[in-house]
Image (tube, rainbow, N blue to C red):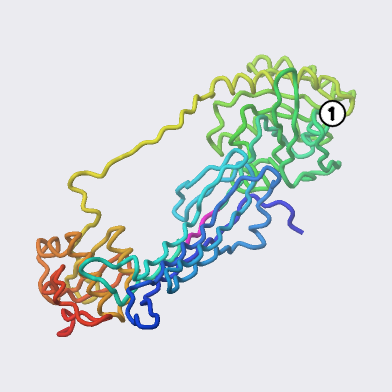
Amino acid sequence: MTTFVDQVQLHAVAGDGGHGCASVHREKFKPLGGPDGGNGGRGGDVILTVNPSVTTLLAFHHRPHHRAANGKPGQGSHRNGAHGADIELAVPDGTVVIAADGEVLADLTGAGVTFVIARGGRGGLGNAALASQRRKAPGFALYGEPGDQCDVTLELKSVADVALVGYPSAGKSSLIAALSEARPKIADYPFTTLVPNLGVVTAGDVTYTIADVPGLIPGASEGRGLGLEFLRHIERCSVIVHVIDCASLESDREPLSDLDTIEAELTAYGGLEERPRLVALNKVDLPDGRLVADMVGSLLAERGLPSFEVSAITHEGLRALSFAMAAAVAAHRAATAQVVTKRIIITPPAVDDTGFEVTRATHSETGEPYFRITGTRPERWVRQTDFSNEEAVGYLADRLARLGVEARLIAEGALPGSTVVVGPGDDGVIFDWEPTIAAGEAAARGPRGTDRRLEDW
Protein backbone atom coordinates (compact mmCIF):
# COMPACT_ATOMS: atom_id res chain seq x y z
CA MET A 1 0.00 0.00 0.00
CA THR A 2 1.31 3.45 -0.94
CA THR A 3 2.14 5.56 2.13
CA PHE A 4 4.45 8.24 0.74
CA VAL A 5 3.99 10.20 -2.47
CA ASP A 6 6.17 13.17 -3.43
CA GLN A 7 5.00 13.87 -6.98
CA VAL A 8 1.41 14.01 -8.22
CA GLN A 9 -0.76 15.49 -10.94
CA LEU A 10 -3.45 17.88 -9.72
CA HIS A 11 -6.51 18.88 -11.76
CA ALA A 12 -8.12 21.97 -10.24
CA VAL A 13 -11.31 23.67 -11.41
CA ALA A 14 -12.48 26.91 -9.81
CA GLY A 15 -16.15 27.73 -9.43
CA ASP A 16 -18.10 29.54 -12.12
CA GLY A 17 -19.57 32.93 -11.38
CA GLY A 18 -23.34 33.11 -10.95
CA HIS A 19 -25.43 34.73 -13.66
CA GLY A 20 -26.95 38.14 -13.12
CA CYS A 21 -30.71 38.46 -12.94
CA ALA A 22 -32.93 40.48 -15.32
CA SER A 23 -35.95 41.47 -13.24
CA VAL A 24 -38.38 44.40 -13.02
CA HIS A 25 -39.93 45.48 -9.76
CA ARG A 26 -43.69 44.99 -9.73
CA GLU A 27 -46.31 45.80 -7.15
CA LYS A 28 -49.95 46.83 -7.09
CA PHE A 29 -50.59 50.04 -9.04
CA LYS A 30 -46.91 50.08 -10.00
CA PRO A 31 -46.38 47.44 -12.69
CA LEU A 32 -43.01 48.82 -13.92
CA GLY A 33 -41.12 49.92 -10.85
CA GLY A 34 -37.67 49.79 -12.44
CA PRO A 35 -34.99 47.10 -12.75
CA ASP A 36 -34.20 45.16 -9.56
CA GLY A 37 -32.16 42.17 -10.75
CA GLY A 38 -29.29 41.28 -8.45
CA ASN A 39 -25.73 40.34 -9.34
CA GLY A 40 -24.42 36.78 -9.44
CA GLY A 41 -22.01 35.54 -6.81
CA ARG A 42 -18.30 34.98 -7.38
CA GLY A 43 -17.10 31.43 -7.95
CA GLY A 44 -14.93 29.76 -5.34
CA ASP A 45 -11.12 29.63 -5.59
CA VAL A 46 -8.91 26.55 -5.31
CA ILE A 47 -6.16 27.42 -2.82
CA LEU A 48 -3.04 25.51 -1.79
CA THR A 49 -2.03 26.06 1.85
CA VAL A 50 1.13 24.81 3.55
CA ASN A 51 0.23 22.68 6.57
CA PRO A 52 3.17 21.52 8.74
CA SER A 53 1.21 18.45 9.87
CA VAL A 54 1.03 17.18 6.28
CA THR A 55 4.17 15.34 5.19
CA THR A 56 3.15 13.68 1.92
CA LEU A 57 1.11 14.29 -1.22
CA LEU A 58 -0.70 11.00 -0.76
CA ALA A 59 -4.13 12.65 -0.57
CA PHE A 60 -3.75 13.98 -4.12
CA HIS A 61 -2.55 10.59 -5.34
CA HIS A 62 -5.90 9.09 -4.38
CA ARG A 63 -7.99 12.13 -5.34
CA PRO A 64 -6.36 14.28 -8.03
CA HIS A 65 -9.50 16.16 -9.11
CA HIS A 66 -10.74 19.11 -7.04
CA ARG A 67 -13.47 21.61 -7.87
CA ALA A 68 -14.64 24.67 -5.98
CA ALA A 69 -18.30 25.67 -5.63
CA ASN A 70 -20.07 27.83 -8.18
CA GLY A 71 -21.50 31.23 -7.32
CA LYS A 72 -25.26 31.48 -6.99
CA PRO A 73 -27.30 33.47 -9.53
CA GLY A 74 -28.79 36.83 -8.63
CA GLN A 75 -32.49 37.23 -7.95
CA GLY A 76 -35.12 39.94 -8.08
CA SER A 77 -35.60 42.58 -5.38
CA HIS A 78 -31.89 43.44 -5.60
CA ARG A 79 -30.84 40.10 -4.08
CA ASN A 80 -27.28 39.23 -5.01
CA GLY A 81 -26.23 35.59 -5.34
CA ALA A 82 -24.04 33.99 -2.70
CA HIS A 83 -20.35 33.57 -3.41
CA GLY A 84 -19.10 30.05 -4.04
CA ALA A 85 -17.10 28.52 -1.19
CA ASP A 86 -13.32 28.37 -1.64
CA ILE A 87 -11.58 25.06 -1.08
CA GLU A 88 -8.21 24.95 0.66
CA LEU A 89 -5.95 22.01 -0.11
CA ALA A 90 -3.31 21.25 2.51
CA VAL A 91 0.16 20.55 1.11
CA PRO A 92 3.49 19.80 2.84
CA ASP A 93 6.13 22.40 3.45
CA GLY A 94 8.43 22.46 0.42
CA THR A 95 5.82 21.80 -2.28
CA VAL A 96 6.64 23.14 -5.73
CA VAL A 97 3.82 23.88 -8.20
CA ILE A 98 4.82 23.26 -11.82
CA ALA A 99 2.72 24.11 -14.88
CA ALA A 100 2.21 21.74 -17.80
CA ASP A 101 4.91 23.56 -19.80
CA GLY A 102 7.45 23.17 -16.99
CA GLU A 103 7.18 26.70 -15.58
CA VAL A 104 7.47 26.89 -11.80
CA LEU A 105 4.36 28.71 -10.61
CA ALA A 106 5.05 28.68 -6.88
CA ASP A 107 7.51 27.34 -4.32
CA LEU A 108 5.55 26.92 -1.10
CA THR A 109 7.79 27.03 1.95
CA GLY A 110 6.72 28.15 5.40
CA ALA A 111 3.68 27.30 7.47
CA GLY A 112 0.52 29.06 6.35
CA VAL A 113 1.83 30.14 2.94
CA THR A 114 -0.98 30.09 0.36
CA PHE A 115 -1.23 30.10 -3.42
CA VAL A 116 -4.40 30.46 -5.49
CA ILE A 117 -4.02 27.79 -8.12
CA ALA A 118 -7.38 28.41 -9.83
CA ARG A 119 -9.36 31.62 -9.43
CA GLY A 120 -13.15 31.63 -9.43
CA GLY A 121 -15.08 33.42 -12.14
CA ARG A 122 -16.68 36.83 -11.60
CA GLY A 123 -20.40 36.98 -11.07
CA GLY A 124 -22.49 38.55 -13.82
CA LEU A 125 -24.12 41.94 -13.28
CA GLY A 126 -27.88 42.09 -12.89
CA ASN A 127 -29.96 44.55 -14.87
CA ALA A 128 -30.18 46.88 -11.87
CA ALA A 129 -26.41 47.40 -12.05
CA LEU A 130 -26.58 47.89 -15.84
CA ALA A 131 -29.19 50.67 -15.71
CA SER A 132 -28.10 54.14 -16.85
CA GLN A 133 -29.63 57.40 -18.03
CA ARG A 134 -29.87 56.10 -21.59
CA ARG A 135 -30.80 52.54 -20.64
CA LYS A 136 -33.24 52.94 -17.77
CA ALA A 137 -34.67 49.42 -17.76
CA PRO A 138 -32.27 46.91 -19.33
CA GLY A 139 -33.99 43.76 -20.47
CA PHE A 140 -30.88 41.63 -20.00
CA ALA A 141 -28.21 40.68 -17.50
CA LEU A 142 -24.65 39.45 -17.83
CA TYR A 143 -23.58 35.85 -17.51
CA GLY A 144 -21.10 34.84 -14.84
CA GLU A 145 -17.56 34.05 -15.95
CA PRO A 146 -16.32 30.45 -15.93
CA GLY A 147 -13.71 29.63 -13.31
CA ASP A 148 -10.10 28.84 -14.13
CA GLN A 149 -9.09 25.28 -14.95
CA CYS A 150 -5.52 24.04 -14.63
CA ASP A 151 -3.51 20.84 -14.63
CA VAL A 152 -0.31 21.13 -12.61
CA THR A 153 2.33 18.92 -11.09
CA LEU A 154 2.92 19.08 -7.35
CA GLU A 155 6.45 18.08 -6.38
CA LEU A 156 7.62 17.75 -2.79
CA LYS A 157 11.17 18.73 -1.93
CA SER A 158 11.89 18.10 1.72
CA VAL A 159 12.88 21.18 3.70
CA ALA A 160 15.91 19.78 5.51
CA ASP A 161 19.17 21.45 6.50
CA VAL A 162 21.33 18.33 6.38
CA ALA A 163 21.05 15.49 3.86
CA LEU A 164 22.57 12.09 4.62
CA VAL A 165 23.63 10.28 1.46
CA GLY A 166 25.25 6.92 0.96
CA TYR A 167 24.82 3.36 -0.19
CA PRO A 168 21.85 1.32 1.06
CA SER A 169 22.44 -0.09 4.55
CA ALA A 170 25.23 2.40 5.27
CA GLY A 171 23.44 3.35 8.50
CA LYS A 172 21.76 6.63 7.53
CA SER A 173 18.45 5.82 9.25
CA SER A 174 20.29 4.56 12.32
CA LEU A 175 22.16 7.86 12.58
CA ILE A 176 18.90 9.83 12.37
CA ALA A 177 17.44 7.66 15.14
CA ALA A 178 20.54 8.20 17.29
CA LEU A 179 20.73 11.97 16.72
CA SER A 180 17.03 12.81 17.03
CA GLU A 181 13.71 11.53 18.31
CA ALA A 182 12.77 10.14 14.90
CA ARG A 183 12.17 6.39 14.76
CA PRO A 184 12.57 5.23 11.17
CA LYS A 185 12.31 1.62 10.06
CA ILE A 186 15.71 -0.07 10.38
CA ALA A 187 16.70 -3.52 9.12
CA ASP A 188 19.82 -5.30 7.86
CA TYR A 189 18.91 -5.49 4.18
CA PRO A 190 19.25 -3.00 1.30
CA PHE A 191 16.46 -0.56 0.49
CA THR A 192 14.95 -0.78 3.96
CA THR A 193 14.23 2.94 3.72
CA LEU A 194 11.66 3.61 1.02
CA VAL A 195 10.85 7.21 1.99
CA PRO A 196 13.00 10.10 3.26
CA ASN A 197 13.14 10.20 7.05
CA LEU A 198 13.24 13.55 8.84
CA GLY A 199 14.58 14.31 12.29
CA VAL A 200 15.20 17.46 14.35
CA VAL A 201 18.59 17.91 16.03
CA THR A 202 19.72 20.55 18.54
CA ALA A 203 23.42 21.25 18.95
CA GLY A 204 24.22 24.19 21.20
CA ASP A 205 22.14 27.16 20.06
CA VAL A 206 21.44 25.72 16.60
CA THR A 207 18.40 23.61 15.81
CA TYR A 208 18.29 22.02 12.39
CA THR A 209 16.54 19.25 10.49
CA ILE A 210 18.26 16.19 9.10
CA ALA A 211 17.02 13.82 6.39
CA ASP A 212 18.29 10.68 4.70
CA VAL A 213 18.07 10.09 0.96
CA PRO A 214 17.30 6.43 0.31
CA GLY A 215 18.37 4.23 -2.54
CA LEU A 216 21.46 5.93 -3.97
CA ILE A 217 23.32 3.39 -6.11
CA PRO A 218 25.33 3.65 -9.34
CA GLY A 219 23.00 4.95 -12.04
CA ALA A 220 20.57 6.55 -9.57
CA SER A 221 20.58 9.86 -11.48
CA GLU A 222 19.43 7.92 -14.56
CA GLY A 223 16.58 6.16 -12.80
CA ARG A 224 18.15 3.04 -11.30
CA GLY A 225 17.00 1.99 -7.85
CA LEU A 226 15.13 4.62 -5.86
CA GLY A 227 17.68 7.40 -6.19
CA LEU A 228 16.17 9.47 -8.98
CA GLU A 229 12.83 9.42 -7.19
CA PHE A 230 14.32 10.96 -4.04
CA LEU A 231 17.30 13.01 -5.22
CA ARG A 232 15.04 16.08 -5.34
CA HIS A 233 14.84 15.95 -1.54
CA ILE A 234 18.42 17.18 -1.14
CA GLU A 235 18.02 20.26 -3.33
CA ARG A 236 17.15 22.51 -0.37
CA CYS A 237 19.78 21.19 2.05
CA SER A 238 22.60 23.30 3.44
CA VAL A 239 25.07 20.46 4.03
CA ILE A 240 25.61 17.03 2.47
CA VAL A 241 26.93 14.32 4.78
CA HIS A 242 28.35 11.16 3.22
CA VAL A 243 27.65 8.15 5.42
CA ILE A 244 30.20 5.43 4.67
CA ASP A 245 29.83 1.86 5.88
CA CYS A 246 33.26 1.01 7.21
CA ALA A 247 32.28 -2.58 8.06
CA SER A 248 30.65 -3.64 4.79
CA LEU A 249 30.81 -7.37 4.08
CA GLU A 250 30.58 -6.90 0.32
CA SER A 251 33.90 -7.71 -1.34
CA ASP A 252 33.46 -5.19 -4.15
CA ARG A 253 32.84 -2.26 -1.80
CA GLU A 254 35.55 0.16 -0.69
CA PRO A 255 34.92 3.39 1.29
CA LEU A 256 36.55 5.88 -1.06
CA SER A 257 35.05 4.29 -4.16
CA ASP A 258 31.63 4.41 -2.46
CA LEU A 259 32.09 8.14 -1.86
CA ASP A 260 33.27 8.74 -5.43
CA THR A 261 30.28 6.83 -6.82
CA ILE A 262 27.77 8.84 -4.78
CA GLU A 263 29.53 12.09 -5.74
CA ALA A 264 29.29 11.12 -9.39
CA GLU A 265 25.53 10.64 -9.03
CA LEU A 266 25.16 14.01 -7.28
CA THR A 267 27.16 15.68 -10.04
CA ALA A 268 25.03 14.03 -12.72
CA TYR A 269 21.88 15.27 -10.98
CA GLY A 270 23.33 18.80 -10.90
CA GLY A 271 23.00 21.91 -8.78
CA LEU A 272 24.73 20.57 -5.66
CA GLU A 273 28.37 21.38 -6.36
CA GLU A 274 28.60 24.32 -3.92
CA ARG A 275 27.13 22.54 -0.90
CA PRO A 276 29.69 21.82 1.86
CA ARG A 277 30.49 18.15 2.50
CA LEU A 278 31.13 16.18 5.66
CA VAL A 279 31.92 12.47 5.95
CA ALA A 280 30.61 10.15 8.68
CA LEU A 281 32.67 6.95 8.95
CA ASN A 282 30.01 4.74 10.44
CA LYS A 283 30.08 1.43 12.36
CA VAL A 284 33.40 2.00 14.14
CA ASP A 285 32.00 -0.07 17.03
CA LEU A 286 33.02 -3.14 14.98
CA PRO A 287 36.73 -4.13 14.86
CA ASP A 288 36.90 -4.07 11.05
CA GLY A 289 35.04 -0.77 11.01
CA ARG A 290 37.55 0.88 13.33
CA LEU A 291 40.48 -0.35 11.27
CA VAL A 292 39.03 0.85 7.97
CA ALA A 293 38.04 4.24 9.46
CA ASP A 294 41.59 4.83 10.69
CA MET A 295 42.98 4.17 7.23
CA VAL A 296 40.39 6.21 5.35
CA GLY A 297 40.46 9.26 7.64
CA SER A 298 43.89 10.47 6.48
CA LEU A 299 42.96 9.98 2.81
CA LEU A 300 39.84 12.07 3.28
CA ALA A 301 41.88 14.78 4.99
CA GLU A 302 44.11 14.95 1.90
CA ARG A 303 40.98 15.65 -0.15
CA GLY A 304 39.97 18.42 2.23
CA LEU A 305 36.91 16.54 3.53
CA PRO A 306 36.30 16.67 7.29
CA SER A 307 35.57 13.17 8.58
CA PHE A 308 34.14 11.85 11.83
CA GLU A 309 34.35 8.33 13.19
CA VAL A 310 30.90 7.53 14.55
CA SER A 311 28.76 4.66 15.72
CA ALA A 312 24.99 4.79 15.68
CA ILE A 313 24.92 1.89 18.16
CA THR A 314 27.28 3.19 20.87
CA HIS A 315 26.77 6.91 19.98
CA GLU A 316 30.54 7.34 19.74
CA GLY A 317 31.49 10.53 17.87
CA LEU A 318 27.91 11.69 17.39
CA ARG A 319 28.32 14.82 19.52
CA ALA A 320 31.27 16.06 17.43
CA LEU A 321 29.39 15.25 14.20
CA SER A 322 26.23 17.04 15.33
CA PHE A 323 28.15 20.21 16.28
CA ALA A 324 30.04 20.14 12.97
CA MET A 325 26.75 19.89 11.09
CA ALA A 326 25.32 22.71 13.22
CA ALA A 327 28.29 24.96 12.42
CA ALA A 328 27.94 24.30 8.69
CA VAL A 329 24.19 24.95 8.81
CA ALA A 330 24.67 28.18 10.77
CA ALA A 331 27.31 29.37 8.27
CA HIS A 332 24.98 28.63 5.36
CA ARG A 333 22.09 30.45 7.03
CA ALA A 334 24.24 33.51 7.67
CA ALA A 335 25.49 33.53 4.08
CA THR A 336 22.03 33.24 2.58
CA ALA A 337 20.15 35.47 5.03
CA GLN A 338 18.06 38.10 3.31
CA VAL A 339 16.29 41.13 4.68
CA VAL A 340 12.77 40.86 3.32
CA THR A 341 11.02 44.18 2.88
CA LYS A 342 7.45 44.07 1.73
CA ARG A 343 6.86 46.61 -0.99
CA ILE A 344 3.83 47.44 -3.03
CA ILE A 345 4.82 48.10 -6.63
CA ILE A 346 2.32 49.86 -8.84
CA THR A 347 3.05 49.65 -12.55
CA PRO A 348 0.75 51.91 -14.58
CA PRO A 349 -0.13 50.80 -18.11
CA ALA A 350 1.65 52.40 -21.02
CA VAL A 351 0.01 55.48 -22.48
CA ASP A 352 -0.61 53.64 -25.76
CA ASP A 353 -1.88 50.44 -24.14
CA THR A 354 -5.48 49.89 -25.25
CA GLY A 355 -5.88 46.62 -23.37
CA PHE A 356 -6.45 44.56 -26.51
CA GLU A 357 -4.75 43.46 -29.72
CA VAL A 358 -6.13 43.05 -33.24
CA THR A 359 -4.16 40.78 -35.57
CA ARG A 360 -4.82 39.72 -39.15
CA ALA A 361 -4.40 36.03 -39.95
CA THR A 362 -5.29 33.46 -42.60
CA HIS A 363 -7.23 30.27 -42.02
CA SER A 364 -4.88 27.31 -42.40
CA GLU A 365 -7.37 25.16 -44.33
CA THR A 366 -9.50 27.53 -46.39
CA GLY A 367 -6.98 30.33 -46.84
CA GLU A 368 -9.65 32.88 -45.91
CA PRO A 369 -8.42 35.97 -44.03
CA TYR A 370 -9.85 36.81 -40.63
CA PHE A 371 -9.16 39.15 -37.72
CA ARG A 372 -8.48 38.00 -34.17
CA ILE A 373 -9.16 40.18 -31.12
CA THR A 374 -7.39 39.28 -27.88
CA GLY A 375 -7.46 41.10 -24.57
CA THR A 376 -8.77 40.64 -21.07
CA ARG A 377 -11.79 42.93 -21.40
CA PRO A 378 -13.07 41.94 -24.87
CA GLU A 379 -12.75 38.25 -24.03
CA ARG A 380 -14.53 38.69 -20.70
CA TRP A 381 -17.33 40.74 -22.22
CA VAL A 382 -17.98 38.11 -24.88
CA ARG A 383 -18.14 35.34 -22.26
CA GLN A 384 -20.67 37.35 -20.27
CA THR A 385 -23.01 38.10 -23.20
CA ASP A 386 -26.33 36.34 -23.76
CA PHE A 387 -26.38 36.10 -27.56
CA SER A 388 -30.03 35.07 -27.58
CA ASN A 389 -30.92 38.57 -26.34
CA GLU A 390 -30.63 41.32 -28.96
CA GLU A 391 -30.31 44.05 -26.38
CA ALA A 392 -27.41 42.22 -24.76
CA VAL A 393 -25.70 41.90 -28.15
CA GLY A 394 -26.21 45.63 -28.78
CA TYR A 395 -24.74 46.37 -25.36
CA LEU A 396 -21.67 44.29 -26.27
CA ALA A 397 -21.32 46.23 -29.54
CA ASP A 398 -21.44 49.50 -27.59
CA ARG A 399 -18.74 48.35 -25.19
CA LEU A 400 -16.41 47.15 -27.95
CA ALA A 401 -16.91 50.36 -29.93
CA ARG A 402 -16.16 52.55 -26.90
CA LEU A 403 -13.01 50.50 -26.25
CA GLY A 404 -11.83 51.29 -29.79
CA VAL A 405 -12.09 47.80 -31.26
CA GLU A 406 -14.06 48.90 -34.34
CA ALA A 407 -11.63 51.73 -35.10
CA ARG A 408 -8.74 49.28 -34.86
CA LEU A 409 -10.49 46.80 -37.17
CA ILE A 410 -10.97 49.53 -39.79
CA ALA A 411 -7.31 50.48 -39.46
CA GLU A 412 -6.30 46.85 -40.01
CA GLY A 413 -8.35 46.69 -43.22
CA ALA A 414 -11.51 44.90 -42.06
CA LEU A 415 -14.54 45.21 -44.35
CA PRO A 416 -18.25 44.65 -43.71
CA GLY A 417 -18.83 40.93 -43.43
CA SER A 418 -15.22 40.16 -42.43
CA THR A 419 -14.74 37.26 -40.04
CA VAL A 420 -13.75 38.40 -36.58
CA VAL A 421 -12.69 36.00 -33.80
CA VAL A 422 -12.64 37.18 -30.19
CA GLY A 423 -10.36 35.11 -28.00
CA PRO A 424 -7.26 32.94 -28.47
CA GLY A 425 -7.08 29.45 -29.95
CA ASP A 426 -10.02 27.40 -31.11
CA ASP A 427 -12.26 28.59 -28.27
CA GLY A 428 -12.75 32.06 -29.74
CA VAL A 429 -16.22 33.40 -30.58
CA ILE A 430 -16.70 34.05 -34.32
CA PHE A 431 -18.59 37.08 -35.68
CA ASP A 432 -19.39 38.50 -39.09
CA TRP A 433 -18.42 42.11 -38.50
CA GLU A 434 -20.95 44.84 -39.35
CA PRO A 435 -19.48 48.32 -38.75
CA THR A 436 -22.88 49.95 -39.28
CA ILE A 437 -23.88 49.15 -35.70
CA ALA A 438 -22.95 52.46 -34.12
CA ALA A 439 -22.54 52.94 -30.41
CA GLY A 440 -24.53 55.26 -28.18
CA GLU A 441 -27.66 55.64 -30.29
CA ALA A 442 -30.38 55.57 -27.67
CA ALA A 443 -33.06 55.98 -30.35
CA ALA A 444 -31.99 52.69 -31.94
CA ARG A 445 -33.11 50.69 -28.95
CA GLY A 446 -36.54 49.14 -29.16
CA PRO A 447 -38.59 47.38 -26.51
CA ARG A 448 -36.87 45.56 -23.66
CA GLY A 449 -34.72 42.70 -24.94
CA THR A 450 -34.45 44.08 -28.48
CA ASP A 451 -32.19 46.44 -30.43
CA ARG A 452 -33.36 47.95 -33.73
CA ARG A 453 -29.81 48.02 -35.03
CA LEU A 454 -29.95 44.22 -35.32
CA GLU A 455 -33.23 43.97 -37.22
CA ASP A 456 -31.52 43.75 -40.61
CA TRP A 457 -28.97 41.09 -39.57
- Image quadrant assignment for residue 304: top right
Image: 404 above or below 128:
above
- Give x and y (percent) for residue 102: 46, 50
Q: In the rendered view, does 161 fall on the left or right side of 46?
A: right
> In which quadrant will I find the C terminus?
bottom left
Main secondary structure along the magenta-highlighted residues? strand
Quadrant hosting residue 425? bottom left
Q: Residue at x 17, y 60 (%)?
A: 404
Q: As shown in the figure, which amino acid type bears the numbered disc 1?
A: Ala
Q: Which residue is mark 1?
A: 312
Residue nearest the observer in this picture, 76 or 118: 76
Q: Quadrant of residue 146?
A: bottom left
Tell how many labels: 1
User: Closest to the observer: 232 or 346?
Assistant: 346
Is residue 109 rendered magenta in the image? Answer: no
Q: Is residue 296 in view from this perspective?
A: no
Image spot of residue 168 (x, y percent): 76, 40
Q: Is residue 110 above or below residue 155?
A: above
Q: What's drawn in magenta, residue-wise? A: 149-153
**Label 1 SS:** loop
Residue 321 appears in the picture as rendered: yes
How crowded pointer 1 is (Cα within 10 Å; few <14, some 14-19, many 20+) is rated as many
Residue 132: where, in percent of width, then height? Answer: 25, 66
Identity of the residue furthest to the bottom in this view:
456
Instruction: Judge left or right: residue 449 versus residue 323.
Output: left
Residue in view at x 47 percent, y 60 percent: 120
72 left or right of 437?
right
Quadrant location, the N terminus: bottom right
Residue 432 locus on image (x, y percent): 19, 76
Classify 317 as above or below 244.
Answer: above
